[in-house]
Image: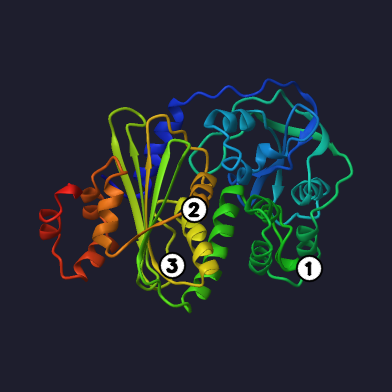
Amino acid sequence: MRTSKATKNAYLEKLTEKIKMNSVDVGKDLDGSTPPSVFIGRWSYPKVYAGPMMVPQLGDTYIMDSPEQWISNNKTQEDIIAYRMNLVRGKQLIEIKDVENPFVEKLQDISLASKSIDSEATFGSKPTGASFNEEITPHGPSAIIEKFDIDAVRWDKQLEKSFYDTDLKARDAVMNLHNKDVPFSAMQKAFSVGAFGLKKNRRLVPTRWSITACDSTIADALLKEVRHYPIMDSHRVYEFSSLNNYYAIILTPTEWQYEWFEAFIKVLGGEEMMFSDYETNTNKTEYSCVGGCYYSAKMAVLDHLAKLKLQSGVIILREAYSGYIPLGVFNVRENIKFAMGGEYKEFESLKDSLVYCGTKLKIPISKYVKQSNLLKELLHSKQTTLDNFFKKSPDLQ
């Protein structure tokens, strides 16, 4: 089992290469609605390919780029892929600071919109292909967009306030919107098109980077708050399953510390791959070796702790099973939000929590412990050697 980011990326690239997606077939002219949805690429940075994501149908297409609605509405993997493969991406090469460009202003209109927007586009060539990788939600064909028009737009009131406050830093805008329950995907898209921040600092941010920026911004602010709360007095286990994933979240009666595990079990064939990363009760300075899911999970749990006004340590165990398809880090964020919003089981010890999780996980819990950093420390802190721990706990083998 390996944990490096290069190894994880190589594994997920191999996985996504094997999955063939059939995207919508459209011509050079397209009349349709945008959900609202935009995409900012990262190649050629500080110039980026930016543009709208349109659907070749008119009407309410909002759900096609609203991950917060998918799990709550029991959407299947097939439903989500069908939504995403119907999104046609138009793009133009734009310098990141050129946020007053008329084309970018239309993208800002789309991102701040409160509902779907009718639009018309002419592409330089027939849109082709599809985009599919582990950190961003997939989408259908793309092409250079030559002409683009949208109908009149009504902005979301909260997003509009942040847009016009050019003295408000972007991180403060994101946190304000989070506190007002603006959906994460809405604020992230607005952030990516340079709709927030001090006027002189506004710029386009690639979609992938903007997702992690918003997750980590919210998590950092919540962590400052949570560190001042009393420590939880028991061990809790929250869990949730959907989209061929199982999540177990263990909260420990300690100061903040966090370890993330994700295992992929027989997704490609007979493999068993595990990746992990962690932080102690100090600020993590380097980017996580497991990528954006680390920050999405961290934010979701800290949001729950802040609402409880409690502090705890966090161990998250995620397993992905045969049939799993990478759909983006929303999958992690939304699954964990659902887990934290549900019932939990309470245990007297970390050992008891792990014994319970071991009855649900397909990989023996002993393998998680052997790969871990924090779990080992927590178990040793009870003066229990790992050998004795496993010897006395055959149900963890």
Quick one: SS at disc 2?
Answer: loop
Closest to the observer: 79 or 285?
79
Label 3 close to label 2 by CB (< 8 Å): no
The amino acid type, in three-letter code, at marker 3 is Thr
Considering the numbered disc 1 on the image, is that residue within a helix, a strand or a loop?
loop
Crowding at label 2, few (<14), some or many (≥20) Cα neighbours within 10 Å? few
Residue displayed at 81% across by 55% down: 100
Say which residue appears at 83% left-offset and 36% top-offset. 118
Lower position in the chain sequence, tag 3 or tag 2: 3
Looking at the image, residue 260 lies above or below residue 176: above
Foreground residue among 87 and 258: 258
| Count of numbered circles on the image | 3
Q: Quadrant of the N terminus?
A: top left
Which image quarter: residue 344?
bottom left
Would you identify the image quadrant in which residue 307 lies? bottom right
Query: Horizontal and vertical percent for residue 110?
Result: 78, 46
Q: CA distance from mark 3 to mark 1?
A: 30 Å
Look at the image and tell me whether residue 92 can be seen: no
Colouring? rainbow
Query: x, y percentage for residue 350?
Result: 27, 62
Task: Residue at 45%, 51% (x, y): give it.
Answer: 291
Q: Residue 285 got which mark?
A: 3
Task: Tell which of 330 and 6 is nearer to you.
Answer: 330
Q: In the rendering, which numbered label is found on residue 342?
A: 2
| Residues at marks 3 and 2, CA–CA distance in whole angstroms | 32 Å
**Please, what is the three-letter code of the amino acid marked with disc 1?**
Asp
**In the image shown, does 326 or 393 lie closer to the viewer?**
393
Image location of residue 212, percent across then percent down: 54, 55
The residue where tag 1 is placed is: 165
